[in-house]
């Protein structure tokens, strides 16, 4: 019987069926961070349980650390408290911890792939909704809550229902100046923020096949914003080239055996799907969100919707303070943020640097612009390439690695009604720290254009023809 | 663990689609190392924003303080995986959420703490919301056995996955014990996985 990758991987990991059509599913890789794991460890202790497979759980800190200095103790007592709890837990239960002290930390969804921990055919769970990022490698990866973190720690398994599978084919060719982030925002706009509820999304088609691994990660990262609990891309030569030689990836004869296995888990050509969607990639424009739900977006050349009958649109326009019909381009911004697990990888910063280089462009004087690498390794590579200097010369602040302004849990936050052009993944009310702050999601290149112009701008105009 | 087949009490209405978990519990309340005290901060920013406009959020309505059933619209609990969101609602007093649809992770997290998320049609959500708003003292009873929510002669069918329903009816929503019962079968599965065995 032909099967999709989702089914093949799911079936391999079934420990046993449970009642009500549920399954006990083995989790091959468990990633933890300082914010959602402390109550799970406490629960474990309260129940007298231990970690069943400490060698399959890996920890880092990302959400809470400041990005100005990693000197301990952190000024924020609660941030410091969460990190200390993590340190105690990894010590007590023998879990490998990628720490700032060893220069190994970073956003959990950036370091997993970077280290080669993330591999095709795995089940991957993390107490974080952007875990589908790892699906870029052909893994079944999903976010879990704290009670489920406890379950994975105690048993290395979870109670899971099989999701339906939708194949999303992106055909044609992207136009210049259109990036993976624009594809993700476009898909969510077309299918709605809840379009993927109950589904795993298989991303396919020529555009996805041509994507680099980092672009695939950006696309899969935002699967959850379209409601899908997991998203993935079938592994191929691009995947293998990216993985080869990474610390946790096997070498020699084991590599050959691994590749054969990874080839075998690809979706069969005649695999059945519960739904099939085709999107013409050549129609996608550089996208920007205008509202408070990720599906509320328009092309950068577009205008704020006029459908004020729709309560969701009216509420969002009111919160944001826009007039219906107003052009999104030209909207002044106060803060520009390039980073996060969506767009905080090397290629994201390199793309921006390539456009800045030799153009003598400067961040507008009233804009606070942050470059926040997704991991220490990304940061080191940017420094090695001299891009830190390039960014600083252009007027950006070059920070330490972390989640930073994606989520208001560390010291990087919006204030008051500030408008932020952000390469992150959520424009929810209050997401960036100020209850009345406003977030416009876009690609890193469009954030850079906004930082320079001081307002939302079509990067194709500002930078000239884009590749 | 106790079975959970019937949940009854007064209800509370929260209108709107795509109410994400950042709104249910803003991120700054995720800085602790336990869930204790989260009930005080449920919908914190929305409540204070409305107060500033001299309007009242449903969670500030003293008459609804004892409500146990929350009636919402579409895609409630989308976004962040934070279990803090259902924890805050449950600690506030909510025992069941009824709505048109839910974020997958939120619904899973809710079941894991014994708080079902029950789906109803758009029409029935409107019907229930009107009934609650017309009479705050009116009580409703969710029956998981027969998959309904009832109040007087109003009977509305509710839906939830068979798995979640079984967990609640059997009292196994806290899954750790069930999962541990698989014993060595867990390691047997691990022994079959190519990537844990050098792809041999
Ligand atoms: S960068 Fe943002 S979305 Fe990604 S893990 Fe950090 S807080 Fe979550």
Image (spheres, coloured by chain):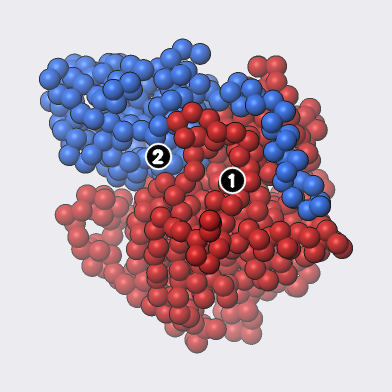
Chain colours: A red, B blue
CA separation, marks 1 and 2? 29 Å
Q: Residue at x 86, y 62 (%)?
A: A253
List x then y, in percent, for residue A377. Answer: 75, 59
Q: Residue at x 40, y 17 (%)?
A: B4
Residue placed under numbered mark 1 in the picture:
A11
Judge depth for marks 1 and 2 and give the one in front.
Answer: 1
Q: Residue at x 53, y 45 (%)?
A: A129
**Of all residues shown, which one is farthest toward the bottom?**
A465
The answer to whether residue B94 is left or right of residue B55 is right
List x then y, in percent, for residue B163. Answer: 44, 31
Of residue A31 and residue B59, the one placed in the foreground of this image is A31
Q: Is residue A243 above or below residue A409?
A: below
Asked if badges 1 and 2 are on one and the same chain, I answer no
The answer to whether residue A341 is left or right of residue A326 is right
Q: Is residue A237 above or below residue A431?
A: below
**Kind of element beneath mark 1:** helix
Residue placed under numbered mark 2 in the picture:
B77
Of residue A272 and residue B75, the one placed in the foreground of this image is A272
User: Residue A153's image quarter?
Assistant: top right
The reply to whether the residue tagged 1 has its Cβ within 8 angstroms of ligand 1 is no
**Of all residues shown, which one is farthest toward the front?**
A1
**Label 2: chain letter:** B
Q: Quadrant of the C terminus of chain A?
A: bottom right
**Of all residues shown, which one is farthest toward the right?**
A252
């Amino acid at each position: 019987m032909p099967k999709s990758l989702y089914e093949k991987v799911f079936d391999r990991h079934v420990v046993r069926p449970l009642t009500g059509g549920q399954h006990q599913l083995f989790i091959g890789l468990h990633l933890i961070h300082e914010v959602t794991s402390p109550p799970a460890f406490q629960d474990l202790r309260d129940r007298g349980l231990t970690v069943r497979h400490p060698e399959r759980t890996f920890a880092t800190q990302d959400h809470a650390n400041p990005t100005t200095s990693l000197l301990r103790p952190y000024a924020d007592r609660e941030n410091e408290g969460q990190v200390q709890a993590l340190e105690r837990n990894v010590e007590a239960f023998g879990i490998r911890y990628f720490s700032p002290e060893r220069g190994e930390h970073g956003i959990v969804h950036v370091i997993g792939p970077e280290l080669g921990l993330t591999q095709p055919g795995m089940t991957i769970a993390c107490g974080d909704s952007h875990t589908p990022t790892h699906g870029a490698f052909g893994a079944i990866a999903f976010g879990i809550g704290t009670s489920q973190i406890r379950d994975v720690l105690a048993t290395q398994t979870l109670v899971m229902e099989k999701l339906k599978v939708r194949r999303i084919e992106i055909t044609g060719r992207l136009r210049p100046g259109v990036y993976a982030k624009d594809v993700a925002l476009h898909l969510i706009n077309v299918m709605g923020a809840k379009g993927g509820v109950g589904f795993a999304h298989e991303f396919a088609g020529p555009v996805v096949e041509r994507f680099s691994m980092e672009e695939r990660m950006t696309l899969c990262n935002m699967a959850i914003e379209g409601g899908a609990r997991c998203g993935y891309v079938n592994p191929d030569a691009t995947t293998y080239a990216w993985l080869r030689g990474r610390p946790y990836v096997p070498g020699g004869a084991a590599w050959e055996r691994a590749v054969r296995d990874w080839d075998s888990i690809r979706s069969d050509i005649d695999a059945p799907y519960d739904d099939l969607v085709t999107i013409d990639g050549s129609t996608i424009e550089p996208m920007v969100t205008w509202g408070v739900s990720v599906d509320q977006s328009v092309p950068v050349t577009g205008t704020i919707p006029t459908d004020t009958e729709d309560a969701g649109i009216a509420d969002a326009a009111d919160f944001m303070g826009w007039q219906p019909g107003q052009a999104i381009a030209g909207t002044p911004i106060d803060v520009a943020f390039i980073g996060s697990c969506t767009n905080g990888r090397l290629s994201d910063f390199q793309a921006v640097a390539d456009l800045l280089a030799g153009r003598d462009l400067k961040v507008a004087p009233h804009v606070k612009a942050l470059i926040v690498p997704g991991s220490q390794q990304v940061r080191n590579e940017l420094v090695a390439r001299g891009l830190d200097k390039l960014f600083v010369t252009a007027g950006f602040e070059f920070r330490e690695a972390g989640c930073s302004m994606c989520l208001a849990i560390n010291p990087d936050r919006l204030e008051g009604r500030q408008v932020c052009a952000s390469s992150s993944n959520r424009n929810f009310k209050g997401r960036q720290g100020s209850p009345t702050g406003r977030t416009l999601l876009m690609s890193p290149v469009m954030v850079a254009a906004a930082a320079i112009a001081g307002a939302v701008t079509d990067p194709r105009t500002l930078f000239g023809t884009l590749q | 663990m106790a079975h959970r087949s019937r949940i009854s009490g007064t209800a509370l209405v929260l209108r709107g689609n795509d109410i994400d978990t950042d709104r249910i519990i803003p991120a700054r309340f995720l800085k602790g190392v336990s869930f204790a005290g989260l009930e005080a901060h449920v919908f914190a920013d929305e409540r204070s924003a409305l107060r500033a406009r001299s309007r009242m959020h449903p969670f500030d309505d003293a008459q609804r303080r004892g409500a146990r059933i929350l009636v919402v619209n579409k895609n409630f609990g989308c976004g962040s995986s934070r279990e803090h969101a259902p924890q805050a609602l449950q600690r506030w007093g909510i025992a069941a959420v009824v709505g048109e649809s839910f974020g997958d992770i939120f619904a899973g997290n809710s079941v894991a703490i014994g708080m079902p998320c029950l789906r109803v049609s758009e029409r029935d959500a409107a019907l229930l919301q009107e009934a609650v708003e017309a009479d705050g003292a009116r009580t409703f009873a969710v029956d998981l056995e027969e998959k309904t929510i009832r109040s007087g002669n109003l009977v509305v069918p509710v839906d939830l996955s068979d798995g979640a329903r079984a967990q609640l009816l059997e009292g196994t929503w806290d899954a750790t014990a069930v999962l541990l019962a698989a014993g060595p079968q867990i390691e047997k599965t691990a022994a079959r996985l190519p990537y844990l065995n050098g792809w041999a």
